[in-house]
Amino acid sequence: MTNAVSTTAENLGPLLIVDDDKAFLLRLARAMEKRGFTVDTAESIRDARSKVEKAPPAYAVVDMRLEDGNGLDVVEMLRNHRPDAKAIVLTGYGNIATAVTAVKIGAIDYLAKPADADDVFDALMRDPSEKAPPPENPMSADRVRWEHIQRVYEWCDRNVSETARRLNMHRRTLQRILAKRAPR
């Protein structure tokens, strides 16, 4: 996906996507290329730093938690190299304090994962003075819980016992949850 040129008529400019979830990163990169961006990707703060220093992009989508640190460092670095850049922070663990911090250091929006490409595109294209509309179909509480369990399960390298310990739940309960389909 690195430096791929879009096939659409309108080129919206360079977009850097920084996320350590490779599957999500590739899906979002393809979707944003189809919408007219020239997409570059990074899976760590180190990779993002070298790309921002070499050619600061006009747009960035950055995951809050990366294996080698905090995605807010990337937003701040981008703001220092290109003050007019539009950056969005994605996170599975949203809270008010980190959202405020993200906006203070230059992010234009803060989206909860799993955000779809339309939400990301709308946030990047929205006039910064315009308020974001409330979500049409917010995730259900069951879906949010399921997403959290899946994320911790992946962090624990798909180890059921370790995941159950960290989530403070019985191993068999976790196994039943993991065996079911994702709620809507």
Image (cartoon, rainbow, N blue to C red):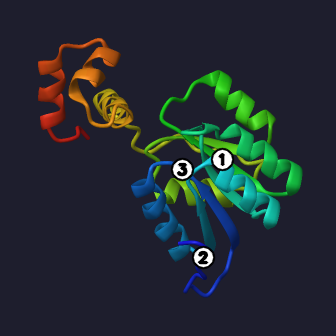
Q: How many neighbours does mark 1 have within 10 angstroms: few (below 14), some (14-19), or many (20 or more)?
A: many
Residue 84 located left or right of residue 47: right
Task: Please say if 26 is above or below 171.
Answer: below
The quadrant where residue 54 appears: bottom right
Task: Please say if 51 is above or below 143.
Answer: below
Question: Residue 31's mark?
Answer: none
- First in sequence, mark 2 or 1: give its number: 2
The residue that label 1 is drawn on is 45
Q: Nearer the viewer, mark 1 or mark 3?
A: 1
x, y percentage for residue 75? 74, 45
x, y percentage for residue 23? 39, 57
The residue that label 2 is drawn on is 36
Name the residue type under label 2: Gly
The quadrant where residue 65 appears: top right
Name the residue type under label 1: Ile
x, y percentage for residue 103? 75, 36
Q: How many angstroms separate mark 2 from mark 1 (CA)?
A: 25 Å
